[in-house]
Image (cartoon, helix red, strand yellow):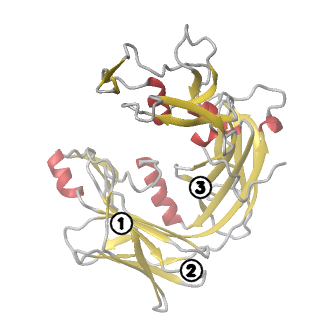
C-alpha cells in the first residue's frame, strides 16, 4: 500500500506539505470516511455518497454501506436518507430545502462513529441570465468555441459559484450502410450443413445519426469578490477546440450554476488542487483536506468532505458548426475511418476433415471475420469484389465508422430541437 504525502490544511499548518514514510501515511489515511454531500434547493431526490479512502493499488473507492444518514433543520425536523446502492444514500422522495432554514448533516457509520457537519444556511438564488458562445483563440493558442455564462445580482456581498455542464451533440456515422450483419455463426461440426457462416440483411434499426453526451468532470469555480459589481460577465465554463468532433454538426450544452458561500468556495478551491474526476471526491487519497464535517465520538476516525448547500439555476443553449465556421471543413471524426479491411472468413491454413461422416475443422484458429463481428470491432460497408486477391467476402471498417450507436443513442433526447 502506497501513500505519497499528507497535505495539512489545519489553521496551524496552512498549505504545508510534510513528507512521511509510507507506513505512517497508511496508518493515518487508510480507511478514512469520504463524504460527498452537495445539496441544492432543487425539488428532487438528493444523493449523498459515502466511501473510504483507498491505496494507489486499489482500482476503485471502497463504498461505505450500512450508515444512517440524515439532515436536520434548525426546527428539529429530520430528512432521512436511505441506501439505494452500496455507498449511495438518497432521500426517500423529492425534497426542497428552504432558504430561511439552517441545516446540519449527521452520519452514523455501522461501526458506531458519529459525524456531524457545521450548520449551513441555503444561499439566496442567483439566476443564470444568459449562456452564449463565441469563436476565439484561448491562452494555449488554440482556436475554438468558448461557452460563457452571465448572471446578475444586486446584493451588497460577493457571490461564489460552482459550475457543471452536460453537453449533447449529434454524431453522424461517415460510412453508414443500410445493411448490417445478420447470421454470424460458428458451426464447428457443420451440423446444419452450412459451416462457418456470415450473412447480411437490411437493418432493422437506424444507426446513421446519434446523440452523444458528456458531463463535466472538472471543478469550475467563479467569484465576484474581486469584481466591481456582483455580476458575472462572459465567465468561461467550457472551451471546445475547433478540432473537437463534438461541435461538428449540432451541439447543445446545459450549464448548471450552484451559488454557495465563501467557505464552500474555499473548500472546492483547495479540492481543485487535488483532483478532477467523475466524482470530485474520489481522488482525495493523497492528503488531508479540511472540510466542515467533524468526528464526534472517536479519537482515531478521520473524515474528508464537505456538506455544501447551494441555490441552483440552469440554462441551455444550442448552436451549429456553421454558425461559427461557415464554409470550413468539419473537425475530424471521433475515430479514423480511412482504413478498409476484408477479414477472411477462414483463417490461414484452414482445412476440414471428414471423420465418421462429420466434417471436422482442423486446427485451433478462429475466423478473423466472425471474431471481429462478435467482438463489436467491425461493421459492414460492402461486398468484396476482389476476394481472390484480397481477404474475405466483405469490406469492413471500424464499427464506429458504420454505426453511430458506438458513441451515442439513436433516439434524440426530449430537449433536443433542430434549428
Q: Is residue 83 above or below residue 11?
A: below
Which residue is disc 2 drawn over? Answer: 95
Q: Is residue 73 above or below residue 40?
A: below
In the image, 402: left or right of 250?
Answer: left
Rounded to the nearest angstrom, the CA distance separating label 1 from label 2 is 22 Å
The answer, for residue 28, to whether it is visible in the render is yes
Q: Secondary structure at mark 3?
A: strand
Q: Secondary structure at mark 2?
A: loop
Mark nearer the N terminus (1 vs 2): 1
Mark nearer the N terminus (3 vs 1): 1
Please tell me how crowded label 2 is: few (under 14), some (14-19), or many (20+) other residues with Cα within 10 Å. Answer: some
Tell me the number on the disc at residue 164. 3
Query: Residue 196, position in %: x, y?
Result: 45, 28
Pair 3/1: label in front: 1
Which residue is disc 1 drawn over? Answer: 86
Q: Looking at the image, which is closer to me, 403 or 370?
A: 370
Q: Residue at x 52, y 49 (%)?
A: 217
Q: Looking at the image, which is closer to me, 131 or 216?
A: 216
Rounded to the nearest angstrom, the CA distance separating label 3 from label 1 is 25 Å
Query: Residue 15, position in %: x, y?
Result: 36, 51
The answer, for residue 334, to whether it is visible in the render is no
Q: Secondary structure at mark 1?
A: loop
Query: Residue 114, position in %: x, y?
Result: 29, 77
Amino acid at each position: 500500500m502506497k501513500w505519497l504525502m499528507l497535505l495539512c490544511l489545519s489553521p496551524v499548518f496552512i498549505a504545508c506539505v510534510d513528507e512521511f514514510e509510507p507506513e505512517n501515511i497508511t496508518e493515518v489515511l487508510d480507511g478514512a470516511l469520504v463524504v460527498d454531500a452537495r445539496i441544492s434547493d432543487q425539488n428532487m431526490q438528493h444523493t449523498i455518497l459515502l466511501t473510504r479512502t483507498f491505496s494507489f493499488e486499489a482500482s476503485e473507492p471502497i463504498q461505505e454501506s450500512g450508515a444512517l444518514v440524515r439532515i436536520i433543520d434548525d426546527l428539529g425536523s429530520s430528512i432521512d436518507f436511505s441506501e439505494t446502492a452500496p455507498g449511495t444514500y438518497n432521500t426517500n422522495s423529492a425534497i426542497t430545502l428552504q432558504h430561511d432554514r439552517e441545516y446540519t448533516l449527521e452520519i452514523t457509520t455501522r461501526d458506531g462513529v458519529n459525524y456531524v457537519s457545521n450548520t449551513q444556511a441555503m444561499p439566496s438564488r442567483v439566476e443564470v441570465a444568459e449562456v452564449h458562445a463565441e469563436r476565439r483563440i484561448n491562452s494555449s493558442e488554440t482556436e475554438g468555441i468558448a461557452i460563457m455564462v452571465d448572471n446578475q445580482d444586486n446584493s451588497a456581498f460577493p457571490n461564489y459559484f460552482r459550475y457543471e455542464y452536460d453537453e449533447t451533440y449529434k454524431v453522424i456515422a461517415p460510412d453508414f450502410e443500410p445493411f448490417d450483419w445478420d447470421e454470424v455463426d460458428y458451426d464447428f461440426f457443420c451440423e446444419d450443413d452450412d459451416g462457418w457462416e456470415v450473412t447480411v440483411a437490411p437493418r432493422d434499426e437506424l444507426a446513421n445519426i446519434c446523440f452523444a453526451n458528456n458531463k463535466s468532470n472538472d471543478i469550475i469555480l467563479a467569484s465576484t469578490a474581486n469584481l466591481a459589481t456582483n455580476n458575472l460577465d462572459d465567465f468561461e465554463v467550457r472551451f471546445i477546440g475547433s478540432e473537437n468532433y463534438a461541435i461538428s454538426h449540432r451541439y447543445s450544452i446545459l450549464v448548471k450554476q450552484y451559488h454557495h458561500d465563501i467557505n464552500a468556495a474555499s473548500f472546492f478551491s483547495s479540492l481543485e488542487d487535488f483532483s478532477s474526476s467523475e466524482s470530485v471526491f474520489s481522488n482525495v487519497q493523497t492528503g488531508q483536506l479540511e472540510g466542515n464535517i467533524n468526528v464526534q465520538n472517536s479519537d482515531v476516525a478521520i473524515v474528508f468532505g464537505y456538506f455544501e448547500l447551494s441555490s441552483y439555476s440552469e440554462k441551455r443553449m444550442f448552436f451549429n458548426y456553421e454558425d461559427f465556421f461557415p464554409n470550413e471543413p468539419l473537425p475530424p471524426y471521433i475515430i479514423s475511418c480511412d482504413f478498409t479491411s476484408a477479414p477472411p472468413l477462414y483463417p490461414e491454413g484452414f482445412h476440414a476433415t471428414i471423420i465418421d461422416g462429420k466434417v471436422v475443422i482442423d486446427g485451433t484458429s478462429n475466423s478473423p471475420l466472425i471474431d471481429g463481428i462478435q467482438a463489436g470491432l467491425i461493421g459492414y460497408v460492402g461486398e468484396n469484389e476482389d476476394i481472390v486477391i484480397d481477404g474475405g467476402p466483405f469490406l469492413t471498417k471500424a464499427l464506429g465508422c458504420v454505426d453511430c450507436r458506438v458513441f451515442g443513442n439513436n433516439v434524440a433526447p426530449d430537449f433536443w430541437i433542430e434549428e
